[in-house]
Amino acid sequence: MTVQEKINALREELNNHNYNYYVLDNALITDFDFDVKIKELEKLEIENPAFFDSNSPTQRVGGEITKNFETVAHLNRMYSLDNSYSKEDLLDWEKRVQKMLGTSEVKYSCELKFDGASINLTYENSQFIKAVTRGDGFQGDDVTNNVKTILSIPLSITKDFVSNFEMRGEIILPLHGFNKMNEERVENGDEEYRNPRNTASGSLKLQDSAEVARRPLDCLLYQVVTSERKYKTHFESLENARKAGFKVPDTIALATSIDKVFDFVNYWDVKRHDLPYETDGVVIKVNNLQQQEELGYTAKAPRWAIAYKFKAEQVSTILNEITYQVGRTGAITPVANLEPVQLAGTTVKRASLHNADQIEKLDIRVRDTVFVEKGGEIIPKIIAVDFTKRLENSEPTKYATNCPECNTELVRTEGDAKHYCPNEFGCAPQITGRIQHFISRKAMDIEGLGGETVDLLRKEGLIENYADLYDLKVEQVIPLERMAEKSAQNMIDGILKSKNIPFEKVLFALGIRFVGETVAKKLAKHFKSIDKLMTSDFETLITVDEIGDRIAQSILDFSSNLGNIQLINRLKLHGLQLEVSAASIENQTNKLEGQVFVVSGVFHQMSREELKKAIEDNGGKVSTSISKKTNFIIAGDNMGPSKLTKAQDLGVEIISEQDFINKIN
Ligand code: AMP
Ligand code: ZN
């Protein structure tokens, strides 16, 4: 066997193992044996770089960093779907279809509507080329590096199938994996992810593909798009896609009439709760591809398909108690503690009640029987009280007056939906929460220190605020439970390293109420230093773009607090970045001051993100939608036709990428 043959044989074998494990759920070898073979292949590939192949199974562990996801035009538009909610809607749709086709000989493919992020996989000559999100349907983001780490997606097709095609599908997070991720987050003191769908689509946009590889994502496929006329029906094309290695769920079924479709709907309305992933409905498609072509598309959806949405499931149960949670900013969230009840496949014990107004609106009281519903969110909602079951001696709920953690009297400022515990520096969950926020990834990004350790450090009396972190010594940390010398050192190194984190992130890390990531960026850019920010008055603050009364007041409150002033001074002494660095001020101008830009299409010299940054660096503003306020549209290739019409209607000036570059140089 030549080296090349050996490499090819190993690749095929490993692909086959991935297929058996991730698609068929049927492992043929142990993880250990798999690793041995991957290492063997890796070694051969390193020794023989001429046989490099980006689709090799060794190229799927991630590691590429994508700073900006490039916008890419879809070869074929990715449409949305029309919705239906009743059997009548479906019968109407069938009538329209039969009328347009002039026949009642129509078969339907019934599929589950997978709840995730749509993806378009392009294959050329049976090789995976790229993965692009749906975006606006005309163009999406190139997320190839991230999608490649999903091991159920074949990168190289060796079986009989069409050779140039797009596979459309949904990237999902199966429930098991999602719950596991959340368990870990709770352990680290991070906020739980709300639902699998958002987490799946968020995962696609992570910059580090190695992090994506760690997430238990999967990809379910539901459409083959190709100009090769090998298959006559949609069902047949999917059956063959499955044989070729794609994960096409076998829940798909054929129906000869809407009545049969409805049997499918009714069956899955109940059985969906046993599935390992979430579905929010059924998609019905005309099966014959010739007929699909005849039916064509409306402005936004195919006429040959329709979605049917399941109704959200409701149950009733008893409200045992209302408790109150204190968040890191002191915000109080009332929680309904329910008599445990089965809902949509899980046991529900708690539901959020949001705030005092919500409790009043529902007129919800302890011992009431309440209706609970599970919508798109993992945390269920209380829809209403069953007043027919209210106990005679029931009394209206009195909202908490004092903090459940520190007993300080709660405050509620006008216009705020929530109550707050004002004891910022003495209330345990606020102290811990503020430090946990400070060290989090999007803030100071301190490696080697997790939320749980912060809690421990505080309980042990080693830290009371984030400035204390910078005084920590390895010797103090080592005696802590489960802390080895190496991890203690890593932690201290991580803390020291964070002194280089740029000002805008430090500003976000401080945890000033209402100052999120974006606002922190705006403030950093405008004021350039913490001193200038903290000495500004209300009038100056609200002149800053997007800073309203509420944020301005919150900054004033923060700045006038003696404790905060001391903290900031200590951070300064420790050498944190409390002003923008010279390097980031460079290249910034006011050339585009007061001008609003919309960026649309695919560009050649700069990426979309680079364009946006250039606009902002030169004092301009980027907006996502075209309005009367828009001054310029920078149009690239394949700008969406609806945007073009709107721009022309409003008389907004359309300029090219080159025009823009000339403007700023
Ligand atoms: P909507 O986002 O409500 O317009 O619904 C359209 C989306 O449903 C598509 O973009 C797909 O991402 C998604 N979808 C999920 N399952 C299917 C399926 N079996 N067939 C077609 N689309 C599906
Ligand atoms: Zn408190």
Image: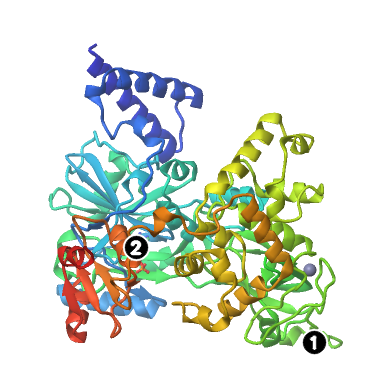
Residue 412 at what x, y percent from top left?
A: 71, 82
Instruction: In this rendered view, identify the residue nearer to me: 76 or 665.
Output: 665
Residue found farthest to the right? 393
Q: Which residue corresponds to the image point at 66% horizontal and 75% vertical from the top-left?
A: 557
Up/down of 122 relative to 192, above or below:
above
Instruction: In this rendered view, identify the residue nearer to me: 229 or 8.
Output: 8
Residue 420 at what x, y percent from top left?
A: 72, 75
Q: Earlier in the sequence, mark 2 or mark 1?
A: 1
> Element type at marker 2?
loop
Is 272 left or right of 316, judged from the image as shown?
A: left
Q: Which residue corresponds to the image point at 76% horizontal and 79% vertical from the top-left?
A: 368
> Element type at marker 1?
loop
Residue 401 at what x, y percent from top left?
A: 81, 79
Up/down of 62 relative to 401, above or below:
above
Is 291 left or right of 79, judged from the image as shown?
A: left
At label 1, the amino acid type is Pro
Q: Residues within 10 Å of mark 1 (few under 14, many from 20)?
A: few
Foreground mark, 2 or 1, reads 2
Which residue matches tag 1? Answer: 396
Residue found farthest to the top? 1
Residue 342 at what x, y percent from top left?
A: 66, 63
Q: Quadrant of residue 601?
A: bottom left
Ligand 2 falls in which quarter? bottom right
Which residue matches tag 2? Answer: 588
Q: Which residue corresponds to the image point at 72% horizontal and 51% vertical from the top-left?
A: 468
Is 331 left or right of 409, judged from the image as shown?
A: left
Q: In this orientation, does residue 299 appear?
A: no
Real-space CA distance between mark 2 and mark 1, rounded to the nearest whole angstrom: 58 Å
Q: Which residue corresponds to the image point at 51% horizontal and 80% vertical from the top-left?
A: 540
Up/down of 582 relative to 164, above or below:
below
Q: Residues within 10 Å of mark 2 (few under 14, many from 20)?
A: some
